[in-house]
Image (spheres, rainbow, N blue to C red):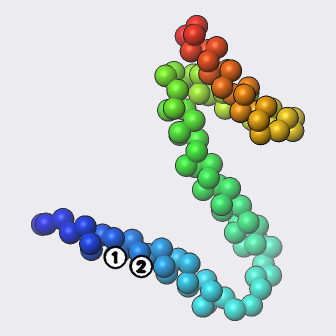
Amino acid sequence: MRNNIYLYILIMALTVFFIRVLPLTLIRRPIRNKVIRDFLYYVPYVTLTVMTFPAIIDATASPYAGLAALIVGGYAAYRDLGLFKVTVLCCLTVFILELFV
């Protein structure tokens, strides 16, 4: 079996195209179901989280430093400190923990 990169690209393009076009063609009325609306509202956030979480843990030399930075960043964001302060706190957490661990 020979790998055909153009076939793979075509299948990927069609898949992405149909995922974006089918909802526009099949659903013409506003969605009134609260469960479906809530689900569709949170899908981008869940997708971003699923892609970002492993990168946070694996980006540091020690997974414990990444996990600690995630916890510190989550708490700082919960306290509404702002993006710059959260980023600085996360970086400092990783820096300090990697010095000692």
| Callouts 2 and 1 close, C-beta under 8 Å | yes
Comparing 38 with 14, the one in front is 14
Residue sitting at 57 percent across and 35 percent down?
Answer: 56
Q: Position of residue 67 (x, y in %)?
A: 61, 28
Q: Position of residue 65 (x, y in %)?
A: 59, 22
Alpha-carbon neighbours of circle 2 within 10 Å: few (<14), some, or many (≥20)? few
Residue sitting at 41 percent across and 79 percent down?
Answer: 14
Q: Amino acid at mark 1?
A: Leu
Direction from residue 60 to residue 8 in the image, left or right: left
Q: Which residue is mark 2?
A: 14
- Image quadrant occupied by the C terminus: top right
- Image quadrant occupied by the N terminus: bottom left
Q: Position of residue 61 (x, y in %)?
A: 49, 22
Snapshot quadrant of residue 76: top right
Q: Amino acid at mark 2?
A: Leu
Extreme residue toward the top, this view:
100
Q: Which residue is mark 1?
A: 10
Residue sitting at 79 percent across and 31 percent down?
Answer: 85
Q: Name the disc covering residue 30, or none.
A: none
In the image, is residue 38 above or below residue 87? below
